[in-house]
Image (cartoon, helix red, strand yellow):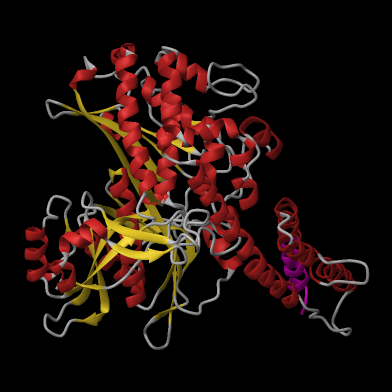
Amino acid sequence: MLEKMLFCIPANAHSLQDVTAVLKEHPEVRFVSLVGLDISGHDTDEKIPVALFLKDFQKFMNQGVQTDGSSVVLPKIAKLSNAKVDIIPDPDVNWYVDHNWAHIDEETGLPMGTLRIPSFLVHNDTKQVGSRVILRDAVNAFKKDVLQMIRENPYVLEYLPIESADEIQEVLLTSATELEFWVKTPDEDADGEQLSTSQVLKEQYWKRTIGPVRTAMERALLVLDKYGFGVEMGHKEVGGAKAKLGHSGSFEHIMEQLEIDWKYSDALQAADNENQVKYVVKDIFRAHGLDVTFMAKPISGVAGSGEHTHMGVAARLKNGKVVSLFAAKEPEKNFLNPIGFGSLMGILKNYEIINPFVSASNDAMNRLKPGFEAPVCIVTSLGHAADTPSRNRTVLVGLVRDIKNPLSTRFELRAPNPKSNTYLVLASGFLSMLDGIEACLRAKKTPAELERSISKEYGQEDFYLETNRAYRTEKDVFEEFTQEERDQFFGRAPETVWENISAFAKHPEKMQVLQRDGVMSELSLESYKAAIVAQWATELHNRILPEAMAVVRECRMRHDSIECTDLDEMRWTKIKHMRSELAQNDIGRDCLLNRIRTALDKECYEEASALQIQMQKQLNELIYSYSEYMKNLL
């Protein structure tokens, strides 16, 4: 069946004649959807009959379809009084078919299809807005500016396999993501202790999949390959527990963490690809009776799901050769060339204003805790020696390199999760790279000098990096540094969404990095902040607080006076006090949950954020204390 289906109309086949011919060969594709991305990364979806799309092809390509500000997240931009937003197709990227595996076309016997066309949002006929627009403009700015920097600082050519900037035809920005996710049988409740034990014993990592998980994984890989994504592998991740074979012969109690990897693309295409991959994975696993979640931390106390984001920069020369703009000319002597070092230093110095795009939700912040391989410090690792590449999985940004393959040289940002807005993560990342490259090239720094800079000690002055920070370690960040040392050397990590987004106000000098060449306007940044703060406050008020109350109510007295011990009584007295402090008002005293609710209602977000941190600590203490109390009851 897969051989008969349409999966992709490539970027070079978007003329009316080409599209008409392809869609007539595939009548099972009945609809077209223009996919616009708002400031939060939410995509639009609508069903336009194929016949109408082809009839008015040029009109759709030029004018798109219209929506309004209430349908997309563009606060401060698309207001109720000025809400006109158009969705305009992008002809320069691949268009993918979204298949409805549950709806079989009667004429062809194939799943009904919708051609999804990545698009740009245009507000009020004048301004292109949203996540795709920002990434496109960031890519264009990087390509133009880095080429100009090479021309103005020709010394850097000594460290590149290029004799002249005139040899460069085009600068290439490449990216790829690694998708981790959890699958489970519907209505299955997580057993945190069992999952944690399995994780510690490494019972799941890279193990053989079985039952419906294996079938769904294999089918997903086959389908993804048909799209041309260049699937590289799928495997089990560290989280999960062994499934059970039920009396019916079917596997039950499935709770597993998986990962799928595919080939890199140029930056904008890579972000589009990721969106489609997630839709395919979710649809296929659901067709096999499995729920899929892309949450960063779906289960407390167990490894969350990351989405390591890889970023590379290369140049296509006029003779057709492609060369890395990061790799050292002498890889046995140097880790990187000046452009590579500058890029890495730019990310590290400006990460406080990248992080709000990486971790923009309560769920994302829950994942970034010490002890689960999720990065919590602004620090990198280059490797123990230039001639022997190594990997440190505890840092924020890892250098990936292969001495035998210079084009593989890239940076792996380890903090993103499957729900991060990849468009804005890449845009802010590449803009920060430009800042570092410019500083290093203007200072005419050599690779040796830049390695000393990035390896500097805390308190040591540098021409670009901050004095009271350290930026490189080859040690295990979690095991060989205390919390106090991590905070001192690498900066205190934000604990709430509000603390994270407040970096925009705390680091005004760094905001110019994002506004370079007009890529992120002041209005778009204000729009993003408003969207994230509203999402955080609403979720905290309407979801997290009620969930916390439910946890408190579940911690009920379970012992009786006959079988209990003095220890049980003592533990319950402590738990009772903790429950009251958290969730029960008294005369003249508001409980913690109510104080958070009041702060949010008054828009006192600084106070609400501090109280949220306090709530999380007290709730975790309650859960632990209640678990100990229950273990002793007969």
Q: Residue 15, image x and y in percent?
A: 11, 55
Residue 299 shown left or right of residue 220 in the figure: right
Give me the residue at 75% from left, 56% from top.
Answer: 611
Residue 620 drawn in magenta: yes
Give me the residue at 33% from left, 64% from top.
Answer: 66
Q: Residue 16, image x and y in percent?
A: 10, 59
Residue 265 shown left or right of residue 432 in the figure: left
Please identify the dominant SS of the magenta region.
Answer: helix
Q: Residue 295, image x and y in percent?
A: 49, 62
Residue 524 drawn in magenta: no
Residue 5, image quadrant? bottom left
Inspect this view and state whether residue 336 appears.
no
Q: Quadrant of the N terminus?
A: bottom left
Give me the residue at 29% from left, 35% from top.
Answer: 408
Give me the residue at 56% from left, 59% from top.
Answer: 363
Number of numbered discs overlaid on the protein picture: 0
Name the foreground residue: 17 vs 150.
Answer: 17
Name the foreground residue: 174 vs 154.
Answer: 154
Inspect this view and state whether residue 531 appears.
yes
Q: In which quarter of the image is the C terminus?
A: bottom right
Name the foreground residue: 332 vs 270.
Answer: 270
Residue 391, image quadrant? top left
Residue 58 lies, with reference to residue 627, above or below; the image says: above
Residue 453 lies, with reference to residue 59, above or below; the image says: above
Q: Residue 588, image x and y in percent?
A: 93, 67
Magenta stretch in the rendered image: 619-634
Name the foreground residue: 460 vs 60.
Answer: 60
